[in-house]
Image (cartoon, rainbow, N blue to C red):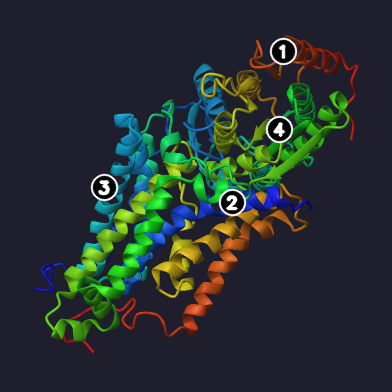
Amino acid sequence: MVFDAVTFGLLLASAVRLSAPILLASLGELVCERGGVLNIGLEGLMLFGAFGAVLGLQWTGEPVLGVLCGVAAGAGAAIVLAVAVAVLRADSVVAGIGFNILALGGTSLGRELLLSPSFTAPSLRALASWRIPGLWEVPVVGRAFFGQSPLLYGGIVLAIVLWAVIRHSRPGLVLRAVGEGASAADAAGIPVTAVRFAAMVFCGLLAGIAGAYLTLVASGGVFTDNVTAGRGYLAVAVVIFGRWKPLWIVLASLLFGCADALQYQGQAIGLALPAPLLLMFPFLLALLAWIVMGRSDAAPGDLGVPFIRGAR
Amino acid sequence: MDQPFRFLSRRIVLGLVAGALLSPGPSPLSARAENAIEVAGLFTGAVTQGNWDPPGFAAFQKMAKTYGFKSSYVEHATYEKAPAILRQLAARGVKMIICQSSGYSAAILEVAKEFPQTQFVLYSYAASTGGLKNYTAWSVNWDEYGYVTGALAAASSANKHIAIISGEEIPSAKRTHEFTTRGAKAVVPDIQVDKVFTGSFTDIAKAKEIATGVILRGADVLLPSADLADAGIQQAAEEEKKLTIGAYMDQSKQFPGAIITSTVLNFDKAYDQMGQMMKAGTLGGQIFQMDLANDGWTLARPFQHVAPEVETQVFGVIGKLAKGEIKLEN
């Protein structure tokens, strides 16, 4: 096995790159969960975002408009899910799983009907890599931290903004109140359903960007069936691993990115582990996160509990 | 205020969702004709995406049309689902089921003996048909394929460092890795060959990530062998200004800045033989080799981005293999 500075730099760059869609989606999930909604449908929302982004790219030829279409697709899909979960009080886990299956079938059908297989994507370099002059060439860390997609930098800024909003602002207080005790929040005059609905739509927006990242940045403008490949579920685990705190979620995303990068780069650097073991590494980490959740007292008090006025 | 859709009970919503989930999806292409022999195709991915299934599907359609067969197909037929799909098709009365991947071999060996009236056909690679009279294979000579592409990559590499990137660890892919290394070392004995499996034939992002990694470690020619995910490898090569090849069909127009040449498999020839033999009732228990000597596959010409001597050298290797002057043995 060769593990020198070049390899470390590659692994780091790969980890940061791979953490981007997970970070964006998990920030959306964070807002949902702080509002008390366990959004298992995140995988499906990402799929719709990924599909919408490629559809937008094919229609307009503009990468930025592609991203916006991905955002619109993610948000639109989130509205449907929010109606079921926040308004109609469907069980969020059951509805989320059903929604993911629908998303898989719906986007596959959409690909067949609406996407051109012979489409050649325009250059996506501006969206894929924003190389900061002077810093990009720095050995080991340059490529990892100063040559990434603007969508990733946006995600990090957003994490800081979310930290400030959730911790120090009135909308953040309202969101936390709904997530910690929906009945008490309702008694205090907070429109619980509206807050949860808005949180889910916000989650859809970010999942849409995460999906757009997967197809436009990571896959060069190609949508394939099930392009998310379980990353939505990983993002749910990242929120738990990050203890429902935005800045911890940035670090947890990076950790999952590392696990992902290890499966990609481990074979190439001759890591003496069976390839299937490397491939399952991020999911083992996710399993660990779910186990941790069972013991955690950091989770919002009403997480996953449908709000029914008058119910105890 | 909090229950504006109270009139829609949870039961109704769940019923609607269940109905949507259970409703039949779009039926696959079906060219119905009364009293015609029914044939079916199994493909690992979508027949409109990538470089492995689309040319095979086109040949499948052409064959069905030529011989007047009723045809249907299944996309995204994963290996673990394959036995169930094969049983379902055979029980329905499909007379010939063509599976386009060596990964289906185990499923055919398991199911074929239960349905002696159905002919099971595999296109890609098979070492044995297990003595079954209703299993026939068209086996691409992946040894030769690997050897030639390895030689091509080695002859094109300035760094003496190449990489072969494959999808899942299926028999044909592992074999190709071995012979790619042999071909590369036959041309440049001290060449470094990185061999990687991405674990997926469809995850373009994963393939691109791995390809970028091997490029940054010094590989300057990448050999893609991951079907749909090849696009990620070719994108990485183009973005990093390195070289690669097209696989299974001419892909030079898709990545003009990176592709030296493309391997072109003669799907039409194989599928036409299947149709002919099905019609004549002569299928069963045989393995047909698809190699350079019998026009089973070739390389697109002219080569791009490399010196003319590379093309001459590679076609020299091809000529020797076709004439049997180079022997590839285990």
Mark 2: few/some/many CA within 10 Å (<14, 14-19, 20+)? some
Gap between marks 3 and 2 measured at Cα: 34 Å
Name the residue nearer the viewer: A139 or A305. A139
Task: Name the residue carrying label 4.
Answer: B136
| Residue placed most toward the observer, B220 or A214 | B220
Is there one chain holding both mark 3 and mark 2? yes
* Residue identified by numbered label 2: A141
Instruction: Say yes or no: labels 2 and 1 on the same chain.
Output: no
Label 3 SS: helix
Q: Is residue B70 left or right of residue B125?
A: left
Residues tagged by mark 4 and mark 3 found on one chain of the structure:
no
Q: Nearer the viewer, residue A300 or B39?
A: A300
Quadrant into which the C terminus of chain A falls: bottom left
Q: Is residue A279 left or right of residue A257?
A: right
**Contact? badges 1 and 3 (CB < 8 Å):** no
Q: Which residue is mark 1?
A: B307
Check disc 2 and give the amino acid type.
Val
The x, y position of residue A98, in whole percent, is 36, 61
Q: Which label sits in the foreground, 2 or 4?
A: 2
Whether marks 2 and 4 lie on the same chain:
no
**Could you say where residue A277 lies in the image, as x and y percent from the top left?**
68, 60
Q: Amino acid at mark 1?
A: Ala
Q: Secondary structure at mark 4?
A: strand
In the picture provided, is A227 more to the left or to the right than B249? Answer: left
Q: Give the percent coordinates (x, y) of residue B253.
A: 52, 19
Report the disc number at residue A72: 3
